[in-house]
Amino acid sequence: MDARTTLFDWRDGELVGGERDGAAPGQTLDVADSFLVADGTVLALGLHRERFLDSVREQGFRDRTAAESFWDAAVAAIPRSGSWFPRFELATIRDAHLLRFRLRTAPALTESVVLATADDDPRRVPDIKGPDIERLGVLRERAQRAGADEAVILDNGLISDGTTTALLWWRGDTLATPPLTFAKVDSVAARTVRGVAAAMRIPVDEEAVTPAELDGAVVWAVNALHGIRAVTAWLDGPRVAQDAARTAAWRSRLAALVRPI
């Protein structure tokens, strides 16, 4: 397909539509999950499936069989060539749940990112990906107008999450993450990096820190689209360090884990 975004709805046990992207009047987004598909391969597809199925249940969609069938049909609809960034959704339209699938071409990928600290936290459902996407988009656009790529959300002054990425950093040879108890989306990319670290017997610590406490640290922003990106600057924030060799090695480790869909 050459459409930038094509929308399908799940009706009567099959995907229907194939129309250009659109949003129904009065639609609310309850759950969203997306990931990069490059020439028919993807990283951690099972974790994305698990998160989506758990999230739609938490948002009130109780038909597990329908959710599983929808997921499988949507995955089957992804082309096996080209670069894609599909999105799996649970929406509410006129008080009824609807499973929707957006087949989207992937945007350009980057290997580095500039951060800025957000001045507020607009999230209403911080632990589920989807309901806050529009509000987080506004926050990210504000950071971009200031010259950054991504905004960092704080929890009582402590680093929690990014608007589209999870944050990780290094303390010497120890990988660090914000506390897993913080209210935030369970990032599949961050889980995968932590899992690789555990397999390599690399220590992983949870740290509740302010941005200033990352001064001199190597910081990564990770997500399911770009993978690992090196944070090269933090506007009005800490002076971050760079470790190009380590970042490249870990990007290669994740690349080795992609599998055919």
Image: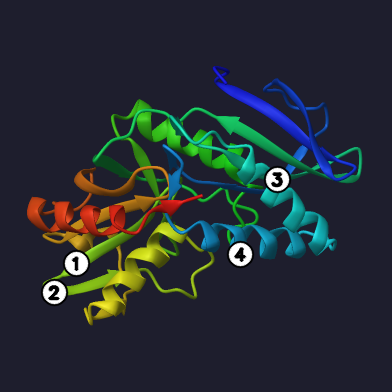
Residue 223 on image: x %, y %? 40, 50
Image mark for residue 50: 4
Q: Amino acid at mark 2?
A: Asp
Marks 1 and 3: which is nearer the front?
3
Q: Position of residue 203 (x, y in %)?
A: 23, 81
Q: Amino acid at mark 1?
A: Trp
Res. 74 image quadrant:
top right
Q: Position of residue 174 (x, y in %)?
A: 19, 75
In this picture, residue 86 sits left or right of residue 21:
left
Task: Say which residue label 1 marks.
Answer: 170
Which residue is label 3 attached to?
73
Q: Earlier in the sequence, mark 3 or mark 4?
A: 4
Gap between marks 2 and 3 measured at Cα: 42 Å
Sequence-first disc among 1 and 3: 3
Which residue is tagged 2? Answer: 173
Callout 2 secondary element: loop
Quadrant assignment for the N terminus = top right
Where in the figure is residue 59, as x and y percent of width and height?
76, 59
Nearer to us: label 2 or label 3: 3
SS category of the residue bearing label 1: strand
Q: CA distance from mark 1 to mark 2?
A: 7 Å
| SS under mark 3 | helix
